[in-house]
Image (cartoon, grey):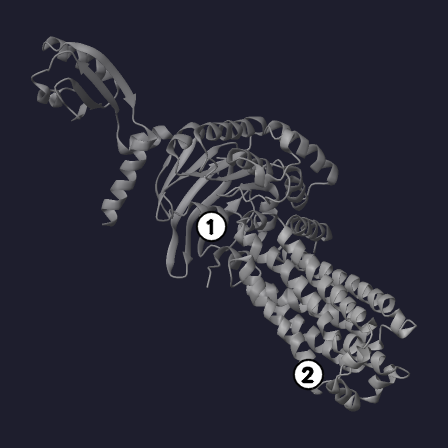
């Protein structure tokens, strides 16, 4: 794998408290990689360590083949970071904010000017570019914060909770922008979030964290396979069907869930078993009005992993 | 190697933020205006009124005058009683008051810059830039130091104008500044500005808000009041040499505070700081 980020057996302590526990993962070039976990899972600490904000207690780290311990400044020059809050200077205008961060990122004055106009236009902020950002809506602030992180056209973007606190429309806009940024530049993105819907839509691969440790990682399909080999099948009936229990003994059925007189929910090994299940029910006199299959959502995978980790810890 | 461009843009940003903050601007304008313009103007206008010689004939000033070293009293030679009292008050006792300005301005801007950045949750984005810890520190320190010195110098020019213009009917000539003021303005003022920056940076690492940092560092004004009381009590006489010595001590103290401030100012500490 052509890795932009390599983390190997990373441990980090705040005093005696373990914040990162034997974390290992790699992020490939051009990939959107998601770090998922509840608050306190260690996502933000991971971003800080990768940017050389402080030294890890143990383990190996490489970002764009640079060592964050000694080359943090170089990494921060090549990467862009969107912090959890927009962190804009609210008494300054969008243009002034971009000028400040563009200069610190090492761009020349002419590059800053050109890039500022491009970003303001792309992020739909041109009309309010000279207004104080304190007067902006949350969505506008977040768009400007992404523009700030992207001003030096970084090869790697760290996005920490990019849609946190936004209304659905603003969140959608931000997600579209992230997709656009990635498409236009092939930028590698490390996305920290606890918004599972967002992760499912944006990420190529995911790492689910809890208390600084990795619970599982891979593509959504990989993660689904970890928690369950199958899919959900919902069947609605016109009249109650008598012998539901017998479904448990049919080929491909993993479990029978949420049953009532008029609906059946089954977990199946895969979709090839759907016709035989439907045929079995019809032969038994069931009057089927609807059959709907559904892949296990990231939310279900996530909750199952978090719950089993909780049980293991207990 | 330090990047001058990075430090310049930090100074630019910090001063732009200060300029947009009305409460800071008002305090930066009002204090010099009151101390260096309005107060002396009122004294000189009152001194122009009939019977002023009697009113300004303070026995304590006479005692001070009797004990003052000749190097200082020489500056008052040829003055009549009213001129002498005014010169003692505005040209000598008032001198330490002037030193409030660099402390107040530098502490105010440094608090806004260091603690204010954390209070407004903008610090983390700043720390994610490639600028080094030293560039960030020096940029922010200069953003507080430069205006503090410039405002104090501008106030000195205004004070000189007020004393000589409003005092002309009484003195009939340009009588201010006395030599000790040059030491205060060009040596002690930058030292106090640096002290204000150093102290505020250190305090800012322990408090979370602009007001907390500003109020705590404001206690440095006690140093100036101590100088003033020392003069009135006859413990210290602010001659040019004493001014140079005071400046030297303040520069040393400022150097130590700034050194400690640089030690405290690193990304890890700043990110993990908790309010105490």
Residue A76 coordinates in the image, percent (x, y) = 58, 46
Q: Which residue is mark 1?
A: A60
Is A192 displayed left or right of A156 in the figure?
left
- Please state the chain letter of the residue tagged with numbered disc 1 in the rendered image: A
Q: For the residue labelled by badge 2, is the local secondary structure a helix, a strand or a loop?
A: helix
CB atoms at circles 1 and 2 under 8 Å apart? no
User: Does residue B63 show up?
Assistant: yes
Is A305 displayed left or right of B38 in the figure?
left
Numbered disc in front, either 1 or 2: 2
Residue B148 coordinates in the image, percent (x, y) = 71, 62
Q: For the residue labelled by badge 1, is the local secondary structure a helix, a strand or a loop?
A: strand
Same chain? Circles 1 and 2: no
Residue B222 coordinates in the image, percent (x, y) = 62, 74
- Please state the chain letter of the residue tagged with numbered disc 2 in the rendered image: B
Q: Which residue is mark 2?
A: B230
**Residue at position x 7%, y 17% from top?**
A242
């Amino acid at each position: 794998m052509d890795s932009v980020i390599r983390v190997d057996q990373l441990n980090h302590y705040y005093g005696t408290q373990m914040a990162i526990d034997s974390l290992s993962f790699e992020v490939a070039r051009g990939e959107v990689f998601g770090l998922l976990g509840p608050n306190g899972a260690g996502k933000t600490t991971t971003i800080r360590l990768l940017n050389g904000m402080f030294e890890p207690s143990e383990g190996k780290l490489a970002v764009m083949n640079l060592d964050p311990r000694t080359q943090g400044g170089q990494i921060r020059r090549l990467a862009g970071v969107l912090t959890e809050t927009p962190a804009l200077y609210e008494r300054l205008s969008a243009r002034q904010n971009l000028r400040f961060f563009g200069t610190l990122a090492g761009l020349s004055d002419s590059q800053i000017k050109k890039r500022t106009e491009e970003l303001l236009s792309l992020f739909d902020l041109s009309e309010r570019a000279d207004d104080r950002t304190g007067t902006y809506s949350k969505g506008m602030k977040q768009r400007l914060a992404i523009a700030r992180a992207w001003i030096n056209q970084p090869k790697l973007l760290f996005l920490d909770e990019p849609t946190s606190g936004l209304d659905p429309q603003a969140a959608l806009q931000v997600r579209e922008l992230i997709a656009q940024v990635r498409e236009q530049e092939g930028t590698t993105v490390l996305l920290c979030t606890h918004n599972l819907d967002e992760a499912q839509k944006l990420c190529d691969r995911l790492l689910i964290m809890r208390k600084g440790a990795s619970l599982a990682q891979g593509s959504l399909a990989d993660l689904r396979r970890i928690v369950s080999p199958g899919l959900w099948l919902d069947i609605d009936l016109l009249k109650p069907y008598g012998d539901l229990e017998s479904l448990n003994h049919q080929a491909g059925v993993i479990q029978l869930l949420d049953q009532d007189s008029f609906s059946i929910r089954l977990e199946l090994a895969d979709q090839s078993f759907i016709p035989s299940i439907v045929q079995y029910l019809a032969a038994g006199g069931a009057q089927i009005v609807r059959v709907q299959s559904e892949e296990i959502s990231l939310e279900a995978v996530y909750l199952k992993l978090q719950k089993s980790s909780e049980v293991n810890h207990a | 190697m330090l990047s001058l461009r990075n430090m310049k843009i930090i100074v630019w940003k910090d001063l732009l933020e200060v300029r947009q903050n009305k409460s800071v601007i008002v305090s930066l304008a009002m204090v010099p205006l009151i101390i260096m313009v309005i107060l002396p103007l009122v004294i000189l206008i009152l001194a122009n009124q009939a019977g002023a010689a009697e009113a300004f004939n303070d026995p304590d000033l006479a005692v001070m005058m009797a004990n003052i070293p000749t190097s200082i009293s020489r500056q008052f030679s040829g003055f009549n009683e009213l001129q002498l009292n005014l010169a003692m008050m505005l040209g000598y006792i008032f001198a330490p008051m002037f030193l409030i300005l660099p402390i107040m301005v530098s502490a105010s801007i440094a608090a806004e810059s260091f603690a204010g950045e954390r209070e407004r949750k903008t610090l983390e984005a700043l720390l994610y830039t490639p600028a080094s810890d030293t560039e960030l520190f020096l940029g922010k320190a200069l953003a507080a130091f430069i205006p503090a010195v410039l405002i104090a110098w501008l106030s000195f020019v205004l004070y000189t104008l007020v004393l000589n213009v409003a005092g002309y009917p009484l003195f009939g000539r340009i009588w201010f500044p006395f030599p000790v003021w040059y030491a205060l303005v060009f040596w002690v003022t930058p030292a106090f500005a640096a002290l204000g920056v150093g102290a505020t940076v250190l305090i800012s690492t322990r408090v979370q808000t602009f007001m907390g940092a500003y109020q705590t560092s404001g206690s440095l004004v006690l140093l100036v009041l101590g100088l003033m009381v020392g003069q009135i009590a006859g413990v210290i006489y602010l001659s040019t040499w004493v001014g140079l010595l005071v400046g030297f001590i303040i520069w040393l103290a400022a150097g130590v505070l700034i050194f400690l401030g640089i030690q405290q100012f690193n990304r890890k500490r700043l990110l993990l700081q908790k309010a105490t």
